[in-house]
Image (cartoon, rainbow, N blue to C red):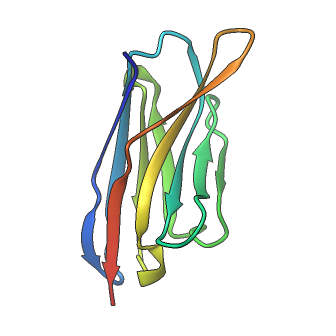
Amino acid sequence: QVQLVESGGGLVQAGGTLKLSCAASGIIFSIGTMGWYRQAPGKQRELVATITRGGTTTYAGSVKGRSTISRDAGDNTVYLQMNSLKPEDTAVYYCKVRATNGLNDLDFWGQGTQVTVSS
């Protein structure tokens, strides 16, 4: 049974920091890119950051310079360190793991963790 367990969300004041974690288990295929997405009320889900198996990272312009994505390959965990948080960062944050069975890519999503930044 595939599980992506997210943690680390919460309420923080503007300028504060949070570190999100997402631990993947039960994925029997090879895990490739891992990433974080977010969805604010009334808006579409958007990419925040991704990290490939080789460690190459990409960031949305809105978080670049304020956030760092990292992963621990040993236990299939991906992290998102967020600094200098702004009220516009308020959203539900979802992790996504892409795995491949050699023929197809399979995407797995976490249940989401709420991040609320107060002004």
Give the total of numbered labels. 0
Residue 104: image quadrant is top right
Q: Is residue 11 above or below residue 35?
A: below
Residue found farthest to the left: 11
Residue located 61% across and 29% down the image? 53
Residue 118 percent coordinates (x, y): 30, 84
Q: Is residue 10 above or below residue 37?
A: below
Residue located 42% across and 40% down the image? 110
Residue 46 percent coordinates (x, y): 61, 60
Nearest to the observer: residue 46 or residue 34: 46
Residue 55: image quadrant is top right
Determine whether, in the image, residue 36 is placed left or right of residue 4: right
Determine whether, in the image, residue 97 is placed left or right of residue 12: right
Residue found farthest to the right: 103
Residue located 36% across and 82% down the image? 15
Residue located 26% across and 75% down the image? 12
Q: Quadrant of the C terminus?
A: bottom left
Residue 50 percent coordinates (x, y): 60, 46
Q: Is residue 37 above or below residue 54?
A: below
Q: Quadrant of the N terminus?
A: top left
Determine whether, in the image, residue 35 is placed left or right of residue 77: right
Residue found farthest to the front: 42
